[in-house]
Image (cartoon, helix red, strand yellow):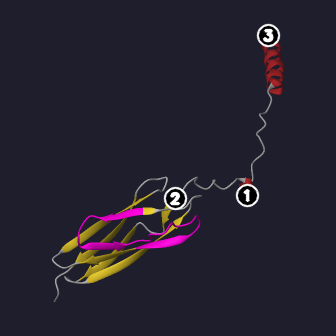
Amino acid sequence: MKKVILGFFFLAFGSTAALAQTTATLPPAVPVDSIAAPAPVVGPSLQFEEQKFDFGDIKPGDVVEHTFKFTNNGTLPLIIANVKTTCGCTATSFPKAPVMPGETASITARFNSAGKRGQQNKVITVESNAVQGSSQVIIATNIVAAN
């Protein structure tokens, strides 16, 4: 008899506790389409299409050239003050006029391999009024002896 009363007691209170629990309601899901795109950078912003370009294998004395395209993704004109290279073997040209917001421009790097051998990595530093400060791109090549 004790077992029956005890069983009834556990059954009654166990089901009452289960009914007393509430399920948590989750906030409605936000559709992906309604998420706003990040706001444009306030001020000038320099964004290169590529950070590094590899010329592959070249011969000693070859002069190679590559153009790095960039966009001003900011809200104010971008002014490039200077472009520095890590070696006198690399020359650059860059726009002197301001690059307006949304416009694309380019920086050209010309590398002269005379007197060089093996793997070469040349860093090009762009000094501008961009909010992120100076930016860098790299040209690379491997200079192999002529056969």
Query: Based on the displayed image, in which of its 4 quarters is residue 14 positioned?
Result: top right
Give the x, y percent position of residue 143. Answer: 22, 78
Label 3 neighbourhood size at 10 Å, few (<14), some (14-19), many (20+)?
few
Q: Residue at x 18, y 79 (%)?
A: 114
Q: Nearer the viewer, residue 56 or 71?
A: 71
Q: Nearer the viewer, mark 3 or mark 2?
A: 2
Mark 1 and mark 2 lie on one chain; the one further toward the N terminus is 1
Residue linked to disc 3: 2
Mark 3 and mark 1 lie on one chain; the one further toward the N terminus is 3
Q: Residue at x 74, y 49 (%)?
A: 30
Contact between marks 1 and 2 (CB within 8 A): the answer is no
Q: Looking at the image, which residue sits at the far bottom?
A: 147
Q: Which residues are magenta?
A: 81-107
Callout 2 amino acid: Ser
Q: Residue at x 28, y 75 (%)?
A: 141
Residue linked to disc 1: 33
Residue linked to disc 2: 45
Q: Measured along the vertical axis of the image, is residue 12 above or below residue 102?
A: above
Query: Based on the displayed image, in which of its 4 quarters is residue 121 positioned?
Result: bottom left
Asked whether residue 124 appears in the rendered view, the answer is no
**Secondary structure state at the residue bearing disc 1:** helix
Q: Quadrant of the C terminus?
A: bottom left
